[in-house]
Image (cartoon, rainbow, N blue to C red):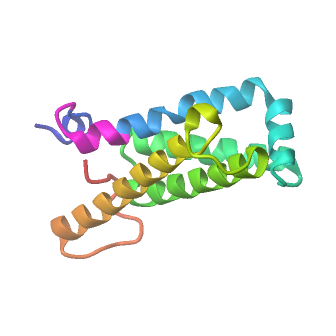
């Protein structure tokens, strides 16, 4: 199997989790782009100032995470960034709606699962690099583990 085919092997659960974790960012990005003022109001209510600057940062970070996870680029770093983005999103949800767990009631259940999935993907990429190369490097290799 070629390297490209292995990056998208639907029988590999790590690949499925990585691609889904990346693609799940797309609706979040589109929602923010289609409702910039509403997104800014949410960020303001969560205590982020200036809110529009945080909307832009969120859009950039979510796009980086979507591309990196979906296309298997720098997964060891993008997975960590994704976990961080989702931790901040969880904080914002708690700050605006109060502490709650169930996602369908405005809780952080979905964000927590997604953050832990992203963190797991990063750990897997770091571990795979170690097993493959016998060492870790800060920026290479370009591709993640699966």
| Camera-side residue of 97 and 18 | 97
Q: From the viewer's perspective, is residue 91 above or below residue 127?
A: above
* Residue 115 locus on image (x, y percent): 48, 51
Instruction: Give, as a single range, the part of the protein colored magenta.
Output: 10-18
Image quadrant containing the N terminus: top left
The residue most toward the bottom is: 135
Q: Is residue 146 left or right of residue 101?
A: left
Q: From the viewer's perspective, is residue 128 above or below residue 44?
A: below
Q: Is residue 11 magenta?
A: yes
* Residue 124 locus on image (x, y percent): 29, 59
Q: Residue sitting at 57 percent across and 58 percent down?
A: 84
Q: Is residue 133 magenta?
A: no
Q: Residue sitting at 61 percent across and 42 percent down?
A: 107
| Camera-side residue of 96 and 23 | 96
Q: From the viewer's perspective, is residue 112 above or below residue 23?
A: below
Q: Residue sitting at 76 percent across and 52 percent down?
A: 95
Q: Is residue 63 left or right of residue 44?
A: left
């Amino acid at each position: 199997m070629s390297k490209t085919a292995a990056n998208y092997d639907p029988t590999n659960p790590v690949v499925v989790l990585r691609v889904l974790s990346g693609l799940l960012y797309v609706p979040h990005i589109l929602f923010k782009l289609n409702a910039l003022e509403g997104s800014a109001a949410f960020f303001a209510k969560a205590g982020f100032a200036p809110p529009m600057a945080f909307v832009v940062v969120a859009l950039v970070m979510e796009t980086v995470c979507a591309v990196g996870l979906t296309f298997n680029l720098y997964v060891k770093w993008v997975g960590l960034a994704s976990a961080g983005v989702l931790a901040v999103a969880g904080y914002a949800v708690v700050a605006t709606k109060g502490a709650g767990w169930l996602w369908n009631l405005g809780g952080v259940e979905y964000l927590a699962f997604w953050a832990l999935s992203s963190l797991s993907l990063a750990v897997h990429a770091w571990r795979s690099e170690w097993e493959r190369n016998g060492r870790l490097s800060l920026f290479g290799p370009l591709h993640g583990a699966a």
